[in-house]
């Protein structure tokens, strides 16, 4: 019953996380698009009122007229919509999932003894310290003199995030490292909203209510953190789905794969942001960010390519099927069965069952990928030996005879 309830907590938490994440990212992407499409007001009176830019748009059968003020309007409107609960809800649901899956079952998804033998409390402490410490370092850099030089700040952040990726992969399982890298970026994003953007907006509103001129520095800080958030978004989305792709987090080159795909996401997002301002360049958008992102993806694909079957095949005959079947039954079928016997599972992961010869034949490609990446069994909890792993691989590479 406990495993069944955890399964539902996972489902409900993940569903909620996706819903509120769409709401946050959608709003964020829209406002970045809007900000970059604003034109000089056609009406001089609007400019005199402090309007810096405006945009006309049509959507859903209606016309919309958006205006952005250089600092704030002369008079505060009666109704003012705030955007923050989408961000907070995304982080809260994400942290809930992190606790249910990774901190609730650290020996399954977070700890890999082959990487570093950690006690559960040690792994959880490292994970939490990474989230808090990463934000403190990032925020400190943004507030330092370095924060006034966007290019230098971006370069330093790229190096530090690369080191964070390496450090996480050096202590956690590949899957645990990837999700914590995404959680680190996600924490930085929502902390930007909670500690910088929203407080700055509240100070501006308070100043207007008191008849004072809002401090333009609050707007500048909020804009900086909002821009950072938009570049973090695609790397975070990759880490959210990465647990489905063992060829990335299970590779011996998992650090380079994580850095490369995070770089690709940021570069591709940069291209879209540049594309928003194509009207300022006569409709032209530089291709180099998109090409950089695609090149990074291509490099990762080449780097992670699996060894051909011939590389592992020798002259000897395939191991007897009875031997392979016994290994799978002992090391794999506890989870990959119609009714798993391994604690914590109420259904076979991803619907993959390995109880019969027909099941094995059906999943040969997936088995080979997981065995080569050493991502299965999870955390090697069933103590599959390298010799057993190689026996199953040899059997697959020699045609999987029965």
Image: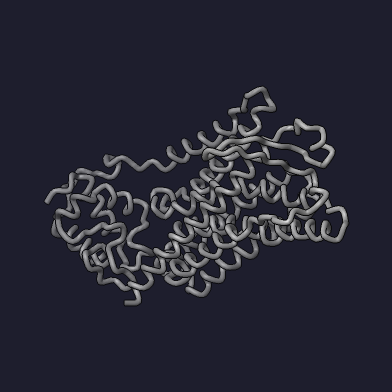
Percent position of residue 203, x then y: 79, 59
Percent position of residue 302, x then y: 43, 37
Check the image and report above or below for 258 versus 37.
below
Check the image and report above or below for 38 versus 148.
above
Q: Quadrant of residue 376?
A: bottom left
> Is 330 positioned to the left or the right of 298 in the image?
left
Quarter of the N terminus within the rendering: bottom left
Residue for point 69% across, 36% down: 38
Q: Nearer the viewer, residue 66 or 175?
A: 66
Residue for point 24% across, 44% down: 313
Q: How many marks?
A: 0
Percent position of residue 372, x then y: 34, 51
Q: Nearer the viewer, residue 234 or 275?
A: 275
Residue for point 31% across, 57% down: 350
Q: Residue furthest right?
A: 212
Q: Residue furthest left?
A: 402
Percent position of residue 24, x then y: 57, 53
> Is 70 positioned to the left or the right of 132 in the image?
right
Q: Is residue 99 visible?
A: yes
Q: Quadrant of residue 199?
A: bottom right
Q: Is residue 111 visible?
A: no
Residue for point 53% across, 43% down: 260
Q: Nearer the viewer, residue 250 or 109?
A: 109
């Amino acid at each position: 019953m406990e495993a069944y309830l955890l399964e539902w907590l996972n489902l409900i938490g993940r569903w909620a996380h996706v819903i509120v994440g769409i709401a946050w990212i959608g709003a964020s992407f829209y406002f970045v698009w809007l900000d970059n499409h604003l034109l000089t007001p056609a009406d001089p009176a609007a400019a005199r009122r402090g309007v810096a830019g405006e945009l006309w748009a049509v959507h859903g059968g209606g016309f919309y007229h958006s205006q952005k003020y250089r600092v704030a309007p002369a008079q505060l409107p009666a109704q003012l919509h705030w955007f923050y609960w989408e961000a907070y809800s995304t982080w809260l649901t994400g942290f809930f999932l992190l606790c249910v899956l990774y901190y609730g079952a650290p020996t399954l998804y977070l700890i890999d003894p082959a990487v570093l033998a950690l006690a559960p409390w040690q792994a959880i402490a490292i994970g939490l310290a990474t989230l808090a410490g990463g934000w403190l370092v990032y925020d400190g850099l943004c507030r330092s003199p370095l924060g006034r030089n966007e290019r230098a700040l971006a370069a330093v952040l790229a190096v530090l995030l690369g080191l964070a990726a390496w450090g996480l992969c050096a202590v956690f399982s590949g899957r645990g490292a990837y999700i914590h890298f995404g959680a680190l970026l996600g924490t930085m994003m929502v902390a930007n909203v909670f500690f910088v953007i929203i407080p700055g907006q509240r100070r501006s509103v308070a100043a207007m209510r008191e008849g004072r001129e809002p401090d333009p520095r609050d707007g500048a800080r909020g804009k900086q953190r909002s821009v950072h958030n938009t570049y973090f978004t695609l790397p975070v989305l990759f880490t959210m789905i990465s647990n489905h792709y063992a060829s990335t987090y299970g590779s011996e080159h998992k650090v380079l794969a994580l850095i490369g795909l995070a770089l690709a996401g940021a570069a591709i997002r940069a291209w879209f942001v540049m594309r928003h301002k194509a009207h300022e360049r006569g409709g032209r958008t530089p291709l180099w960010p998109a090409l950089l992102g695609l090149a990074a993806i291509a490099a990762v694909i080449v780097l992670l390519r699996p060894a051909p079957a011939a590389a592992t095949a020798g002259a000897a005959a395939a191991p007897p099927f009875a031997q392979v079947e016994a290994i799978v039954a002992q090391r794999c079928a506890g989870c990959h069965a119609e009714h798993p016997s391994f604690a914590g599972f109420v259904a076979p992961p991803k619907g993959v069952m390995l109880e019969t010869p027909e099941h094995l034949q059906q999943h040969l490609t997936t088995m080979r990928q997981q065995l080569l990446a050493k991502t299965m069994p999870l955390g090697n909890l069933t103590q599959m030996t390298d010799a057993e792993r190689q026996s199953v691989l040899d059997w697959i590479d020699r045609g999987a005879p029965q």
